[in-house]
Amino acid sequence: MSFSFINKISLYLSFILIISCQDTVSFIGKDENINIENTNLEFETEEFFDFSFFEDPTNNIIDIYTYQLSTFNFLNNDQSKLKINNYESKYSINTPINSIYFEDHIFSINKKGELLKFDTDTGKLIERNNIQLDLVTKVPVSFSLYKNDFIVALKTGEVARINKLGQVIWLFKNNDFLNTPIKIYNDNLIVLYSDKIIFLSPSNGDIVYEKIFKSGNILQSSGGKIANYYNIIFFILSNSEFKAIDTFLFEEHNLNFDKFEINTSLNNLKDQIHVYNNFIVYVDDGNIIHTYDMNLERFVLRNFRINNSSHVIILNNALISKNENFLYFYNIKNGNLFTKININKVLNKKSSIINALVINKRLHIFTDKGMIIIFDKNLNIQKTINLKIKNINQVYSYQNKIFVNTEKGITYIY
């Protein structure tokens, strides 16, 4: 038998073996942990979904990342709400502009970069102030409260501290476009540009720290992502670089976690970073989970793939995934299911999950179609509520309020 013929037979048998394995194994890495496709999912038997509420304790500091307790009871039939037209236009940016209660009024900023002031009882616009910047366009990226002033970041790269009349206290100029909302952390303003991170002093706008991360990856219009663990800031830049900075030492923090290879697609809008206790989770492209234990300094879950998911969100120790027929609650530590719920008669098949909040010790899941599913401690559906609000693109909780933003630039406040 010729050597050439043997090679052909070996190649053919190898091809058959590869094909037969593809239906069962999704990834075999160098770690001892081997993860399988979720067609072979196991249900969690040792842990429960964590209903704890981890409140941000800072006072007079509010940004889009703030998560504070609200006592609003959606189980009450009286679902009174306030409506304000805070953006005054349809959104053309990825993250909606939030609204903030300050000195007995509601403040926000519209598409033109005007500071708006609303009545807290009626939602009526009572004052409009032009932010005094010599710019042709002032499209905002984020709006935050810092002590008695506001921090405004613009798409053109400028960051400004203004008072409640729109008067500029200081201005930081940068020539790079800005798509990521600013995070206020440890009395610093964290600004993510396309290929660099900058820490600004909120007192005077001076640069405290700056680091450039060059990359050959395509720049993403969706902006970056930020999460924190004690003094460590984890972030994804618009060029898809995933890094960590120690905010005490102001130097790059090295973990094995930031050395894994992510799927750099043309749009990283579906990528997420989440921190829960000593675990950091990276959701790559909306369907691949990597979980790293920072105490043990190793992966506990790697390249775990979720199939047929239209949208995922993470709350505490669970990743919640939705497809047309089911909600899946995955344990972020091992990929096991806390529960799997048939939603055929509950949600529109084409609806997307916008956010999940713990309110009054119950889990509330909000969708873009205006539906809320309320779960009890055992993750049983207690009630579904139709808010009768369409095209929701953001839900957040602080100042004992629930804010619901829509694509048309309207905000409803409960």
Image (cartoon, grey):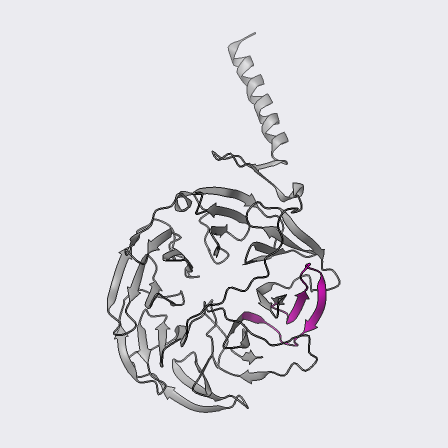
Residue farthest to the top, as pictured: 1
Check residue 391 for magenta coloring: yes
Asked if the magenta segment contains residue 158, the reply would be no
| Quarter residue 130 falls in | bottom left
Q: Is residue 136 left or right of residue 328?
A: left
Near-viewer residue (353 or 256): 256
Between 356 and 27, the one lying in front of the other is 356
> Which quarter of the figure has residue 360?
bottom right
Q: Is residue 403 above or below residue 367?
A: below
Q: Residue at x 47, y 46 (%)?
A: 292
Determine if residue 261 is in view: yes
Q: Quadrant of the C terminus?
A: bottom right
Q: Quadrant of the N terminus?
A: top right
Residue shown at the point (36%, 58%) measured from the top left: 231
Q: Residue at x 26, y 61 (%)?
A: 209
**Residue 136 seen by the camera:** no
Q: Which residues are magenta?
A: 367-395
x and y percentages locating residue 305 in the rendered image: 57, 45
